[in-house]
Amino acid sequence: MNTTLAQARPFPYALDLARAALVVIDMQRDFIEAGGFGASLGNDVTRLQAIVPTVLAVLQAWRRAGGWVVHTREAHRPDLADCPPAKRLRGRPALRIGDRGPMGRLLVAGEPGAEIVPALAPLAGELVIDKPGKGGFHATPLQAELARRGIAQLVLMGVTTEVCVQTTMREANDRGYDCLLVEDGTESYFPEFKAATLAMITAQGAIVGWTAGAAELISVLPR
């Protein structure tokens, strides 16, 4: 199905649902709930919790329309062999990647904190990608999975806007995908960083991609 988001920014976005994937980035407990990695960095996680209903509304509408869904989780191997010291030792957090917190070892695959929040849990047939970096394409099978399904467009949501979401969107742009970011389906611990990211993405004629509101996207999806 082809449709157009007339109000997308900076100009209308032509959506081909059959060749598009909804990519939900890192909506996992370690970033969104108290006691996780995000909180260990001193962040207010309630900002990220607030977008869960919007992400769920888009996810449900996309599923009803028959669209394909990808979920990512930032999650490392238990031995941390895929977590370079330059990442693990950066800054002065209360807990580091791999340390044990209230939801198990932080950002480690298989631990409770690395799981996607229950409200947004993947369904059978949806792809779940564990990524060791900030971008969804680095050291993952995402590119191969998209190519296998003939995907040419990515609609992105998730956290955080300026880190994992923007990194994935830029990686995708370099690989030739037309990307749309759902503005109220993404969030940052820092509101000014989110605003700057949205501006950077759409600048210079959608140099990285488009943005649109959740309601705008949902309104053009078949019911």
Image (tube, rainbow, N blue to C red):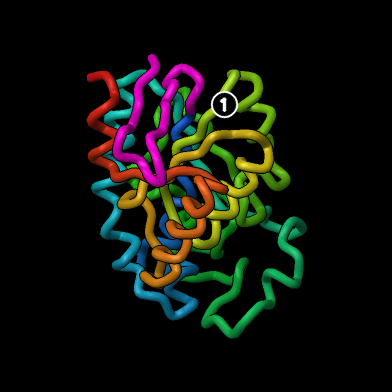
Residue position marked by numbered label 1 in the rendering: 152
Residue displayed at 29% across by 24% down: 221
Disc 1 marks a residue whose amino acid type is Ala
Would you place residue 84 above or below residue 92 in this image? above
Kindly tell me whether residue 158 is visible in this rendering. yes
Image quadrant in which the C terminus is located: top left
Give the camera-side residue of 25 and 125: 25
Look at the numbered disc 1 and give the secondary structure of its residue.
loop
Q: Position of residue 119 (x, y in %)?
A: 30, 44
Please give the count of numbered marks on the rendered protein: 1
Residue displayed at 50% across by 34% down: 154
Q: Position of residue 112 (x, y in %)?
A: 46, 54
Residue displayed at 45% across by 25% down: 68
Q: Neighbour class for label 1 at 10 Å: few (<14), some, many (≥20)?
A: many
When asked about the image quadrant of residue 87, the answer is bottom right
Looking at the rendering, the stretch of residues picked out in magenta corresponds to 1-20
Give the camera-side residue of 16 and 78: 16
Residue 5 lies in the magenta-colored region: yes
Question: Is residue 130 found left or right of 45 in the rendered image?
Answer: right
Q: Among all residues in the image, which is located at the extreme top? A: 1
Give the camera-side residue of 174 and 86: 174
Would you place residue 29 above or below residue 13 in this image? below
Kindly tell me whether residue 119 is visible in this rendering. no
